[in-house]
Image (spheres, rainbow, N blue to C red):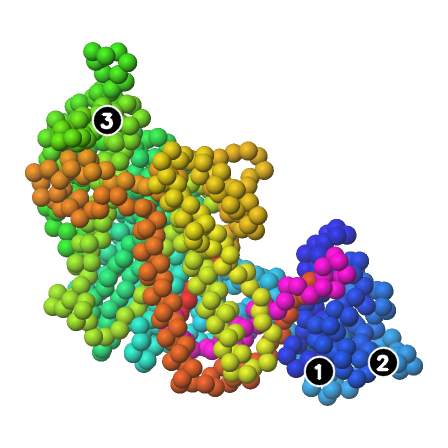
Amino acid sequence: MSGGTENNRYIVQVFVGALSQHYEALSVEASKQTTSDEIVSCIVERLSLADSPGGSYELAEVIGDSVGQECKERRLGPTESPVALMLLWPKLLHSQQEYYRFYLREKLSDSLWTDSFTMDPQLIRDYFYRFLYQPKDREYPDLCQLPDLNEVVLLDNLRARFIAGHIYTYVGSILIAVNPFKFHPIYNPKYVKLYQNRRLGPELPPHIFAVADAAYHCMLKERRNQCIVISGESGSGKTESTNFLLHHLTALSQKGSHGSGVEQTILSAGPVLEAFGNAKTAHNNNSSRFGKFIQVNYKENGMVHGAVVQKYLLEKSRICSQGRNERNYHVFYYLLAGASDSEKNLLHLQKTEDYSYLSKSGCYILDNVDENYEFSRLKQSMEMVGFTPEKQRRLFAVLSAVLLLGNVEFQPRKLTYHHDEAVGVRNPEVVLLISELLRVKQETLLQALTAKRARASGETLVINYRLPEAIAARDAMAKCLYGALFDWIVLQVNHALLSKKDTLRDHQGNSIGVLDIFGFEDFGLCNSFEQFCINYANEHLQYYFNQHVFKYEQEEYRKEGIRWTDIEFMDNTACLQLIEGKPNGLLCMLDDQCNFPGATNETLLQKFNSVHKENNFYEIPQRREAAFIVRHYAGKVKYQVTEMREKNLDLMRQDIVGVLKNSSMAFVRELVGADPVAVFRWAIVRAFFRGYFAFHEAGRRHRQYRDGNKPSAIQSRYRNHTPNENLISFSPKHNSNISGSSRSSYGYQKQRNINSNESQVGLQ
Ligand SMILES: Nc1ncnc2c1ncn2[C@@H]1O[C@H](COP(=O)(O)OP(=O)(O)OP(=O)(O)O)[C@@H](O)[C@H]1O
Ligand SMILES: [Mg+2]
């Protein structure tokens, strides 16, 4: 119930008893003006009762006690307002035994009616007891057990559990985690042991370890690959959950007290990737700025065999600039805080505030984080994943070079032709340090930062940069170096994660994959291409979720001949189509405009607007501005078009790669060796969808398998429970239009122990 003014909408719940085989109660959205008759006709229509013989119904207000011993009821007159009545019901206290309900029944003749009477207790037990007895003073560890299921009750239940210190709640085989933002002592070895071999179930409180356990045992039992999908907005706890899952997935296979090397390597990969790929944002102090899919491979006997990490789309723009209250990647601050004096000397490190790439956002420290300690932890983790101290030194040298690049400044160069706007480097001593760190010739570096070379008719032309081009070349070099370094780290980590003896191709057993991507983001006025890509990936994840939770589940009910009212869900297919459709999807048009001579971000926006202004998922901002709005599943987000084209192209510039390829240090050459010259950034997001389609395919095969093997699984699930919730809302047109439709009931059909090959973890 929500509330206050005359026009507010309320949920009126009406129990229908034996009038429906499927529902115990229906929830009707109504206002104070809605009459009892209107609600009756709406439900009668919904349950197709008008066709039944007799066909005349009324609402009654029932007052019952919690043990079903006594029950009073009163008929509502046709023009009475159920909402007004409901608001008069006393607020229930724990000590109170009475409950108030509306229920629908066939009309009694007036002569039979008395204002209140006592009914046969046996009848009450058999007939009303089920819905009258709905204890309010307990929380349910599985939302499917809620006797009265609607959004308010569901959220109340989650809140009550959270207040009681229970951050996890099941919805069938899905786990909801509500981020506590404080330490709960529920992940120690005692809990690892407790949840071993326990799957999901009512015996133990819901826990992330149980999800890992379910996936592991299902993999062993069915000899099929498993995947765990984690979704939630930025800061909701996906990465933390991934770490707990990996912790348990590696612990499960350990027979002794200490894991073999490979388990430790898997666990050490996390801190390394997080140091280089996570940063503080406005939403999350440890926000993942890349997506990852970690696949843990097991031998047939259930022992960990190795693992593979795939990364998707590192946010490279963060290297050169960050929003207010945001930071660059953690590793820079760790290095500057933790390096010894001799390391500082060797790497030419300066104070954090002296680096332009770190100081512009004005945000340096993270509360409650000792970066000096984090640096030693990082070095230890790097060692565990096979980075020798020598490799670490080289890697830190590249980091130092990236930071120093940001300090390179330009000034106009005095040339013979006064109209030439060529620039030179104002502080060549910085370039000297960079060239030492990267072992490239200072002269070559200076040239690459100030001019580009082009070949025409067999001759090499040197074209001087103007100031903005020089700055762009400098930033492109920093981003290119860091991006290549990150790719190299992932490659090294994968190398260490592969079992020494075997290659992946020889791998005989099965695997469990965990997908942890960057969460949905909305930075208000500052959303750019990065947020567009991130939210597109999340939109796709939501689509996957919808497909599995609603669409396929309902298709199976239908196939098995179960009488079923389709659950309406927020289908986001059209939003995806807006983004990725061909040839007019936003991404397609963006690519076109990147290739079109003379196109600008302005013309890009004009194209977007002219093609999609009628699209329900696209909006043009009311105020004239260089932005467009997309209606995502998680809300509207306004994207600025400034730099969209440039960011989409994200060219790996040949001239810059050329400089690095000339390094006398094999490590730097290796970094840029395999890079393509130009990559459309969102082509990297496409790699994410390769992973996504692998999930999809696994799901399809699983359903095929289940159809062929266990045809009666759902029917037996269905028989055990009765769905009890259906939401109908009044539309202003004739006050009895059914929209909202039934939701959530599917959860009642979920089996306790996972027999799906995809366990899903949803986060707040
Ligand atoms: N189970 C938990 N117990 C205690 N604290 C938690 C838990 N889960 C998350 N947190 C806290 O919330 C913070 C954010 O969580 P996390 O980094 O996992 O979010 P995320 O969903 O991965 O966000 P993003 O999409 O930005 O990467 C963590 O740094 C941690 O402080
Ligand atoms: Mg994360």
- Dot 2 surroundings within 10 Å: few (below 14), some, or many (20 or more)? few
Q: Residue at the location (15% across, 51% down)?
A: 387
Q: Residue at the location (31% across, 26% down)?
A: 468
Is residue 247 visible to us here?
Answer: no
First along the sequence among labels 1 and 3: 1
The amino acid beneath tag 3 is Val
Most extreme residue toward the front is 457
**Which residue lies under the disc numbered 2?**
108
The answer to the question of whether label 2 and label 1 lie on touching residues, with beta carbons closer than 8 A, is no
SS for dot 2: loop
Q: Quadrant of residue 42?
A: bottom right
Q: Where does the magenta region start and end?
A: 730-758
User: How many angstroms separate mark 1 from mark 3 (CA)?
Assistant: 79 Å
Q: In the image, which disc is placed on residue 18?
A: 1
Q: Residue at the location (67% across, 73% down)?
A: 25
First along the sequence among labels 2 and 3: 2
Of residues 160 and 666, the one nearer the viewer is 666
Is residue 624 visible to us here?
Answer: yes
First along the sequence among labels 2 and 1: 1
**Which residue lies under the disc numbered 3?**
408
Q: x, y percentage for residue 668?
A: 14, 42
